[in-house]
Amino acid sequence: MKTNTSLSRSVANIVFTPTIIAYGWIVVKYVVAGLILYGVFAFGAYKLQLFQNLGNWPTLSKAALFLGPFLIGLGLYYSTQPPSYVVIVPGAVYGLLSVLAGLALRKLNA
């Protein structure tokens, strides 16, 4: 069983950060590369059993996890639109949410 700090660090490095990077790649029209990045890291997190105790996660951490696919879908939409600075906002909000979600995971069972 992973400790809370280790789980928080692993989820941040293997789930949340690659999601933000994949979103960035997708909105700048590296769609296939972004989808592959997201898929590989999501599968890797599953194989590392990071989601084993998902039911015990704080609500904020679950929300960040489940908003990841929504962010990727939003990136796919933005990749079809003309370039705009508006695409920065969802990535920044998800980044802040993922930091707070990681901190919430640290406090799990503390």
Image: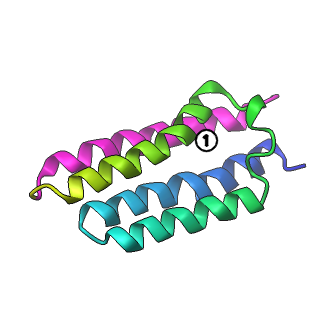
Q: Main secondary structure of the magenta part?
A: helix
Point out the image quarter for the C terminus: top right
Q: Residue at x 33, y 66 (%)?
A: 25
Tell me the kind of residue under disc 1: Gly
Q: Residue at x 22, y 52 (%)?
A: 78
Q: In the displayed structure, does residue 61 sit left or right of residue 70?
A: right
Q: Position of residue 1 (x, y in %)?
A: 90, 49
Q: Position of residue 33 (x, y in %)?
A: 40, 74
Task: Reply above or below: 60 against 94.
Answer: above
Q: Quadrant of residue 43?
A: bottom right
Task: Identify residue for label 1.
Answer: 102
Q: Quadrant of residue 29?
A: bottom left
Q: Residue at x 74, y 37 (%)?
A: 54
Task: Reply above or below: 19 against 70.
Answer: below
Which residue appears farthest toward the top when viewing the image?
59
Looking at the picture, the colour scheme in use is rainbow
Magenta span includes 97: yes
Q: In the displayed structure, does residue 9 sit left or right of residue 48?
A: left
Looking at the image, how many numbered discs can be counted on the residues? 1
Q: Position of residue 16 (x, y in %)?
A: 53, 51
Q: Position of residue 72 (x, y in %)?
A: 40, 52
| Mark 1 surroundings: few (<14), some (14-19) or many (≥20) residues within 10 A | many
Q: In the displayed structure, does residue 24 sit left or right of residue 14?
A: left
Magenta span includes 87: yes
Magenta segment boundaries in residue numbering: 83-110
Q: For numbered disc 1, what is the local secondary structure?
A: helix
Front-lying residue, 36 or 85? 36
Q: Residue at x 61, y 41 (%)?
A: 102
